[in-house]
Amino acid sequence: MKNEDVKEKIANEVIKDFVWRRRWRLVTWIGVSIFVILAIVKYLIAYGIPTFGNQIAVIGINGEIGQGQIASADKVVPVLRNAFENENVKVVILEINSGGGSPSEAERITSEIDRLKKKHPKPIVAVIGGLGASAAYMIAVHTDKIVAGKYSLVGSIGVIMQGYDAHKLAERLDVKQHVYASGPFKDLMNPLHEPSDAEKKVLQAIVDNAAHAFIAEVKIQRGKKLTRDDIYTGQVWNGLDAIQFGLIDKIGTLESVTTDYSDLKVSNFGPNIKSPFSANFAHELGAGFAEGVLTVTKQQIEFSK
């Protein structure tokens, strides 16, 4: 092969490599940009556009209050902290539509409300939409004011524990269970054996003790606002009755409450609504970036074949 041919071949390879590298950079830049944009759009669709300036932070307590739920303490507590620690937030509203749930989850939320109210004093209002009952009402009583609609259902102050008795079904199917327990009450609420009178007594005591604690909490938080002593039966009332009994402070809706603060912008804080500069957003962004790089790298490998 002549020197000229060798030089020409080398030059062609250099040019091809240069073109390929420029194409790779362009494809990489386009790919990463697309996934960054998609991550931002995904965040805004899921969490809403961040609001700046003085504002009302609306925090949702929706559905069952329990671990793994949208109204779990793990999701609500961080949002409460964001709202109270944000200097632009002048008022916090809990938008409640829940039939209750776990008392221990509600306790974590109420304890944080009490702590944040002392550390970052600002008004906090509970607005009950369709339903604010049981553990949801327990959360509401720790706010400065409770508002509910005329047709909202409020109350259900009490505790319930449920189980199933399937021991007759097991007998019919000839299913036998062998239980080895360290104590007579270690096997409480086992659906495959009929509960004894002693077990029923223990379970009822658990429920009664929890109910007494709940009632005491309502009395401490609502105080002299309560006008009746027979509201602790587990019953729910509409808003018109609830205001007569002192369970709520005002008839209204989320819109009527926010109108009282017309100089403030309404911002939906979540749960899980965070600033676009938070770690949550960084994770979304990082995930999009990584996915983009992986996709483009795959394209590079296929292109170079």
Image (tube, rainbow, N blue to C red):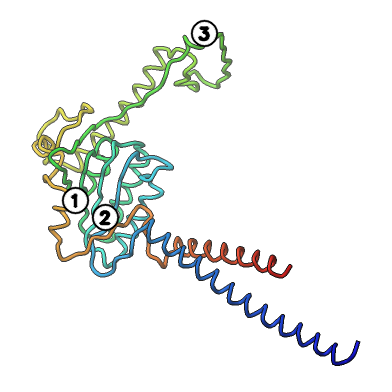
- Depth check: give the residue in front, 64 or 235: 64
Which residue bears the numbered disc 1? 254
Q: Position of residue 220 (x, y in %)?
A: 20, 41
Q: Residue at x 34, y 37 (%)?
A: 103
Q: Secondary structure at mark 3?
A: helix
Q: Residue furthest right?
A: 1
User: Of circles 3 and 1, which is in front?
Assistant: 1
Which residue bears the numbered disc 3? 171
Q: Is residue 288 above or below residue 197?
A: below
Q: Residue at x 26, y 67 (%)?
A: 88
Q: Secondary structure at mark 1?
A: helix
- Depth check: give the residue in front, 161 or 268: 268
Kindly check if marks 1 and 2 are in contact, taking CB atoms under 8 A apart as contact.
Answer: yes
The first of marks 3 and 2 along the sequence is 2
Which residue bears the numbered disc 2? 58
Identified by mark 3, the residue type is: Glu
Q: Secondary structure at mark 2?
A: strand
Q: Position of residue 105 (x, y in %)?
A: 37, 41
